Image: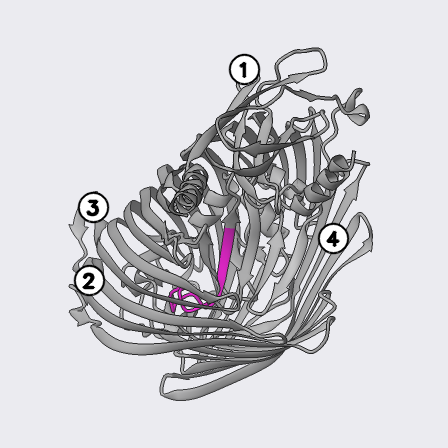
């Protein structure tokens, strides 16, 4: 009896030992002519459910191998462009050399290799829109082109907006700490080949900062197969003046590490024409400005992932931007009426600005997955160093009503700004069961900004310090944050809730004005999403979020930037944060139609308003807090196919803005109904969908912004892309502002304020682009959608 028990225990021990061991699986792949196939994609799949275990590529001799393979039944999938996929069943119980894999050339591609591109898809979730673009023709361009065609996203004046709101941009869950214009340049020069999806998150979860009222999240696909690929690109744009940009991206993945590097160079000259009309009590001043701006920008991005093992991953990333050359020449002419012979009737200003800027951002991240409950621990630390230097020379000639020269005024300014941003964040997520999860985290952030502005008046060819316009500004902001969130799914109901608390400490000081803006406040920010699946085709949902927008430290900086002697742009050190409460009720029908009603209230809303001083005749653009803005609206969205190759998105919003504020001891209230409509068409041509066209129109009706009336605008873009060279190359054509209806006209008229602005921002252009992909361009990603299809194919193969 003891011997029997001993034999059973020995057998069990041996079996357990065998299954706990790992082995090596190797093989060789060739074509039908017995030639080795290099860089073929090899996937190791579980036989049970076809989930991906590992991936690799063959070497120059056609050899490949997998290490650390546990004993089990598997499927080997081998694929290469222009060949039929091959599937082999294997059982691993020791080191295994599998039989030779022979790939058969695809009959359909013997004469010409064809790559069929998928169509983008749009998915509505309770708190976001998800625009899936992986392996679509859009992924052959740059990130900015993808955003221009993302439903609900508007690229306006080189800034990304979502329904009049500038979103917080995240790339792979990392916040991008650069300005709106810098983000546009970064995305313009970054390949979209690795983008998986764009998420427009209108009600972000608690783990996002309380400042993230709307989040634009760019999700990158992570390649599973080892190998190398890359691309080079070049674009030529003709607007008023020509612009060029070019660059390259490289991606390498080994067994444990992956590296992505991207470089782009932008060289452009931009024209901007403005006309400002100011109605003073006894005079009208009309100023025509023509700004020409030359810039050269270098962008470099790096991402490094190191998978220690299945449970631990280290990430290092860098986003850097260098602006070694910036020159802006602003020429303005101002006419004053009525003309009086012996008084100033006109003046001409020449403004020359030369800037240099470096923006260096670095991230260190770590992810640990716990074996027991699949919980995850995330750590991320970020550092940004922003260095900016500017020199401005302004000269103005004044003329009397009889056209005789009166006087010349000249001055120069020297400005520097040095900013440092440090953040650290720790998050923990725990799947409680199949239907619920819990997440918590803490975050620390600190912003330090030191600025100085020195103005010298030119008097008799001598520089004389202007004390009134010379200043030093220091800003220090620290935020301590913590949050909790809980998600739960039932058969028909789902709940996502969270609570975030943030303690903010701000110290801001202007030396010349002797103004201090010290703030210390604790605020709570709840968020909640609740949805009910009424039927297979109808879902009803509601959500609520409270968020904060802290003033940008550049808006707090009281330094003055002169367009001419009488037009100034300056900051406001007394700005207060904006608190936003947003509640929404919506219904989704058949995953095609969505209807939403919403209400928003912005307490202390901030607008940049032109304020005319009727005594000094100076127009000052400065940011001001108003009491509040209320917004109510009704949205309708639809995303559907007209025919198989023609997809349409229609989104329209009817909303009312009501601004309320106090100005010159008077309470002002102004409201207006407006309409926002976006119409996007995606059309594919040819059998392989290699020719695509995107046509987008966005209409923004006349609306109110900070007591100002902004006239209606129509944005229109047409982009055409053709893939060629066996899928390795693509050419593109983009035409922007087809109908020439994108210029801005703003009217400011309340109390003693009466002025208008016409702004032509050089939005009309034609862009030609070329991109060439090299290396192993068919690397698979973890988000592989064909596992069900692969199981069906294997079922057919097993039946023989």
Q: Is residue 259 visible?
A: no
Judge left or right: residue 557 versus residue 29: left
- Magenta-drawn segment: 205-218
Query: Quick check: marks 1 and 2 in contact, CB under 8 Å?
Result: no
The reply to whether the C-beta atoms of the residues labelled 4 and 2 are less than 8 Å apart is: no
* Residue 473, placed above or below residue 23: below
Q: Which of marks 3 and 4 is nearer the N terminus?
A: 3
Name the element at disc 3. Answer: loop
Taking the magenta stretch, the answer to whether it contains residue 206 is: yes
Q: Nearer the viewer, mark 3 or mark 4?
A: 4
Q: Mark 1 or mark 4: which comes first in sequence?
A: 1
Q: Residues within 10 Å of mark 4 (few under 14, many from 20)?
A: some
Q: Which circle's residue, 4 or 2, is located before the other in the chain? A: 2
Which badge, 3 or 2, is on the more N-terminal residue? Answer: 3
Q: Residue at x 40, y 52 (%)?
A: 174
* Mark 2 element type: helix
Q: Which of 220 and 550 is in front in this view?
A: 220
The residue to which callout 4 is attached is 681
* Residue for badge 3: 460
State the image coordinates of residue 83 (x, y, percent, origin top left).
Answer: 71, 25
CB under 8 Å between callouts 1 and 3?
no
Q: In this view, does 722 lie to the left or right of 111?
A: left
- Observer-side mark, 1 or 2, equals 1
In the picture of the structure, the residue carrying the numbered disc 1 is 60
**Which color scheme did the rendering employ for the protein?**
one colour
- Residue named by callout 2: 468
Residue 550: % across, % down: 34, 68
Q: How far apart are marks 1 and 4 (CA)?
A: 44 Å
- 214 part of magenta stretch: yes
């Amino acid at each position: 009896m003891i011997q029997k028990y001993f034999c059973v225990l020995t057998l069990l021990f041996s079996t357990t030992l065998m299954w706990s061991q790992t082995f090596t699986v190797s093989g060789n792949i060739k074509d039908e002519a017995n030639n080795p196939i290099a860089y073929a994609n090899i996937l190791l799949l579980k036989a049970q459910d076809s989930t991906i275990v590992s991936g690799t590529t063959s070497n120059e001799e056609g050899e490949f191998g997998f290490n650390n393979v546990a004993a089990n039944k598997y499927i080997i999938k081998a694929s290469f462009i222009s060949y039929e996929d091959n599937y082999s069943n294997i059982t691993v119980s020791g080191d295994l050399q599998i039989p030779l894999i022979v790939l058969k050339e695809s009959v359909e591609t013997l004469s010409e290799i064809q790559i069929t591109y998928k169509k983008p898809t749009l998915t509505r979730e309770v708190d976001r829109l998800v625009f899936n673009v992986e392996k679509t023709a859009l992924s052959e361009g740059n990130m900015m082109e993808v955003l221009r065609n993302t439903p609900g996203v508007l690229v306006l004046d080189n800034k990304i907006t979502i329904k009049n709101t500038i979103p917080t941009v995240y790339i792979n869950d990392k916040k991008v700490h650069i300005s709106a214009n810098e983000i546009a340049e970064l995305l313009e020069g970054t390949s979209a080949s690795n983008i998986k999806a764009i998420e427009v998150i209108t009600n972000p979860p608690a783990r996002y900062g309380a400042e993230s009222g709307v989040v634009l999240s760019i999700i990158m696909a992570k390649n599973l197969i080892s190998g190398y690929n890359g691309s080079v690109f070049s674009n030529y744009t003709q607007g008023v003046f020509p612009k060029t940009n070019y660059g390259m991206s490289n991606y390498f993945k080994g067994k444990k590490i992956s590296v992505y590097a991207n470089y782009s160079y932008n060289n452009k000259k931009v024209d901007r024409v403005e006309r400002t009309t100011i109605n003073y009590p006894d005079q009208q001043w009309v100023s025509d400005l023509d700004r020409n701006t030359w810039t050269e920008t270098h962008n470099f991005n790096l991402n490094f992932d190191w998978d220690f093992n299945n449970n631990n991953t280290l990430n290092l990333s860098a986003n850097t931007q260098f602006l070694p050359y910036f020159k802006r020449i602003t020429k303005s002419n101002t006419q004053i009426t009525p003309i009086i012979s012996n008084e100033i009737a006109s003046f001409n200003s020449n403004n020359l600005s030369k800037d240099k800027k470096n923006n260096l951002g670095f991230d260190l991240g770590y992810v640990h997955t716990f074996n027991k409950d699949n919980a995850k621990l995330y750590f991320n630390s970020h550092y940004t160093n922003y260095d900016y230097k500017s020199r401005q020379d302004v000269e103005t000639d004044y003329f009397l009503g009889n056209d005789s020269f009166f006087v010349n005024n000249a001055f120069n300014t020297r400005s520097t700004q040095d900013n440092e941003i440090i953040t650290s964040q720790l998050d923990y997520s725990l799947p409680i069961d199949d239907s619920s999860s819990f997440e918590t985290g803490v975050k620390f952030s600190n912003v330090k900004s030191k600025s100085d502005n020195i103005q010298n008046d030119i008097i008799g060819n001598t520089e004389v310090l202007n004390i009134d316009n010379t200043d030093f500004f220091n800003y220090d902001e620290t935020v301590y944050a913590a949050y909790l969130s809980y998600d739960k799914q039932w058969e028909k109901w789902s709940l996502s809730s969270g609570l975030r608390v943030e303690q903010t400490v701000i110290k801001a000081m202007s030396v010349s004005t002797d103004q201090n803006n010290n703030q210390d406040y604790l605020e709570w920010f709840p968020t909640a999403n609740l949805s009910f699946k009424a039927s297979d085709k109808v879902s009803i949902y509601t959500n609520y979020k409270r968020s904060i927008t802290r003033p940008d430290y550049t808006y707090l900086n009281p330094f003055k930037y002169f367009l001419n002697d009488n037009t100034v742009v300056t900051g406001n050190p007394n700005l207060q944060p904006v608190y936003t409460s947003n509640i929404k009720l919506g219904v989704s029908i058949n995953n095609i139609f969505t209807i939403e009603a919403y209400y928003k209230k912005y307490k202390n809303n901030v607008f940049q308003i032109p304020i005319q001083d009727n005594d000094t005749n100076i127009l000052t653009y400065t940011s001001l807090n108003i009491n509040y803005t209320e917004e109510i609206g009704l949205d309708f969205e639809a995303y559907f196919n007209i025919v198989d190759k023609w997809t349409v998105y229609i989104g329209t919003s009817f909303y009312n803005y009501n601004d309320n504020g106090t100005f010159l001891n008077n309470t002002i209230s102004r409201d207006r109904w407006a309409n926002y409509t976006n119409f996007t068409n995606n059309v594919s041509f040819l059998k392989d969908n290699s020719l695509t066209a995107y046509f987008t129109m966005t209409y923004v009706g006349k609306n109110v912004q900070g007591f100002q009336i902004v006239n209606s605008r129509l944005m229109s873009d047409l982009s055409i892309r053709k893939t060629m060279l066996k899928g390795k190359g693509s050419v593109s054509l983009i035409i922007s502002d087809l109908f020439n209806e994108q210029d801005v006209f703003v009217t400011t008229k309340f109390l003693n304020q009466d002025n208008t602005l016409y702004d032509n921002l050089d939005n009309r252009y034609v862009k030609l682009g070329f991109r060439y992909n090299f290396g192993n361009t068919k690397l698979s990603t973890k988000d592989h959608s064909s596992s069900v299809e692969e199981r069906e194919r294997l079922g057919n193969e097993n039946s023989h």
